Image (cartoon, rainbow, N blue to C red):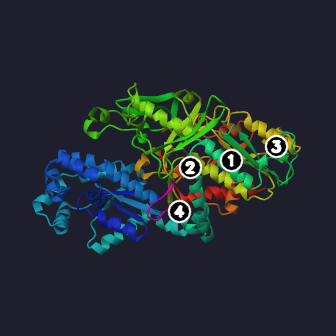
Amino acid sequence: MKILGITGGSGSGKTTLLRAVEHLGGLGLDCDAIYHCLLETDDALVAAIGARFPGTVRDGRVDRPALAAVVFADPAELAALDALTHEAVAREVRRRLWQSEAPFAAIDAIGLFESGLAALCDETVCVLAPEETRIERLIRRDGISRERALARIRAQKSDEALRAQCGHALWADAPTPEAFQQQCEQFLKGVLMMEETKKFEKEREALLSSPKNGYDRISEADLAAMESYCKEYMKFISDCKMEREAVKWTIEAAEKAGFRELKPGMQLKPGDRVYGNNHNKSVIFAVVGSESLNEGTHICAAHIDSPRLDLKPNPLYEDAGMAYFKTHYYGGIKKYQWTTTPLAIHGVVAKKDGTVVTVTVGEEPGDPIFCVTDLLVHLSADQMRKTLAEGVTGENLRILLGSRPLKDDEGADRVKFAILMLLNEKYGLTEEDFLSAELTMVPAGPAREVGFDRSLIAAYGHDDRVCAYAAFKPLLDLGTPVKTAVCVLADKEEIGSVGISGMQSQYFEMFMEDLCEAAGASKRRCFEHSFCLSADVSNAFDPLYAETCDPTNNTKINYGTGIFKYTGARGKSGSSDAAAEVMGYVRRIFAKHDVIWQTGELGKVDQGGGGTVACYMANRNIETVDAGVPVLSMHAPMEIVSKLDTYMTFKGMKVFYEEN
């Protein structure tokens, strides 16, 4: 999209040029109109204006004549207003540009350069008109006096200053409004090369990439399948909030579909379905193909752990008549997001006698929930001065458990003791049992649909169980593929894929070696001819935080599954960086099967970054590329995905398994 920046003083004719843009099929963005719209909808902006310019806001609404009288009489006051409004207007402009599919656009702003919007523009033009003409237009248009019109004009930039900043100047000196309209259209055709665009329309369509919203491309059959699939996925994500639960759930579903545990010494034939359970924390599934494993496999590798609050080894204590659990957060979180969030406890306790007890409280309708408390706003003066990272500390992420002591108990820590009595009564636990427990606090409650149109899904743990389910589900109905299909659901990705159940462990090698031996193949030959989709989520573009991303290289909601050539941080640190041929292969099979997909990277180059299991698969000499669902609010207690992207990721994994 080519973008023209339009600036000029009040009454110069900018609006006529903007209307000409719209008449020719472009997107017109009138920053003055956007500003007035924000005055009606942006409460924070209105409050800031009221605080800076007393008497200009009444009953929550800006008195525009009163505000104009103040700012146009004093350049310093006008600059102060601009400082308040430019950021809000620029954010809305970026949002509208991002959502538009128009072939070109124009931004009309008096403060085009001061607001930073000029940086978005390919060309800039100042519209100029004689002062007397501008005065007459303002009197006629705004119903103001000649004196106020002149004051407004004199408070703005001179023609000379505007010409110095802009690449083009357009004089509004036509004898009639109709003639100036024609002058504007002729100017636009020259600046935006619109005649050449029309001349090369077919060539441009063939050569240029123009991604479309998935809902403009998806078939009716896929729409129906999408709703059915997402309903199943919502059940899975609601039931499986930690890796142990996901392993148990998937194994039970796989066994019903004919999978059996892979044992050393087994002999396998095409169509056989096997799995390996790695300490109940990660799991691998495989459907043996008709082709020898020496010719490689098709692997989808996802992870089933998510950021959470793990209990410390000695978690239970009492303070001020209330009982708490101490926690140690797992993975990357914004700590402040976990306060006042309804939480449930999930996990297992390995008791001294060897028995293992499963604990789940907070998910059933009649269950209690738990939470981390927060400081009331009335006493938050010191807290509010801190950064978001410092406002809530890791040590203060403590879980409120209860406050009622046992009747007639006169010992110390009466509430703590009462809580322990309840745990002992239901689970047979003692305080010492916490030393050999894996108990974690996660957001309580099921997945929910989001929006009036129910097009989005909110849940805890989309990262990365939305991709894990997409990788696992196709195997249940898969016949005998050409290439052996392998699904890896790994643990510990959120803390570096370490440990016995992480992707860096030797378990994957052990499983694949047993699989190859059972099918009479070499693991080394298998790896060098294998292809892996590292199924992990991506950051969906969020217009509220547009400054963190490169819009043309970021995945978007409803544009399909995201394929990433590389992830990593800054200089691609921690990335496997897939080869061009790898990306080309994915393009071919997705195009062949009408899989809606997009590509991107994790934010601006120096903004941050992140990794996946891709590099650990690539380290094994397996061609690997990242593929997954774009997520809003990633790593928050509640993450959001679109149904379309969720389904297209499943469809992509399915056709990948089926492809030879």
For marks 3 and 1 on the same chain, the one whose residue lies earlier in the sequence: 3
Of the numbered discs 4 and 2, the one sitting upstream in the chain is 4
> Distance between the Cα atoms at labels 4 and 2?
15 Å
Q: Which residue carries the number 4 mark?
A: 213
Q: Which amino acid does label 2 sit on?
A: Gly
Residue 174: which quarter of the image?
Answer: bottom left
Q: Mark 3 points at which residue?
A: 515
Say whether residue 606 is left or right of residue 133. right
Q: Tell me where the magenta segment starts and ends, as one range.
A: 447-455
Crowd band around label 2 with a 10 angstrom C-alpha radius: few (<14), some (14–19), many (20+): many
Q: Are marks 3 and 4 in contact (CB under 8 Å)?
A: no
Is residue 345 toward the left or the right of residue 582 in the image? left
Q: Which residue is drawn at 17% across and 51% down?
A: 71
Q: Which amino acid does label 3 sit on?
A: Leu
Disc 4 and disc 2 in contact, CB within 8 angstroms: no
Give the labeled residue for mark 1. Answer: 580
Mark in the foreground, 2 or 3: 3
Q: Name the residue under label 2.
A: 600
Above or below, 83 relative to 433: below
Local crowd size for mark 3, using a 10 Å CA cut-off: few (<14), some (14–19), many (≥20): many
Q: Is mark 4 on a helix, strand or loop?
A: loop
In the rendered image, residue 451 lying in the magenta stretch gets the answer yes
Q: What x and y, as percent, mark residue 229? A: 61, 61
Q: Which amino acid does label 1 sit on?
A: Ala
Sequence-earlier tag: 1 or 2: 1
Q: Which of marks 3 and 4 is nearer the N terminus?
A: 4
Q: How crowded is mark 1: few (under 14 residues within 10 Å), some or many (20 or more)?
A: few
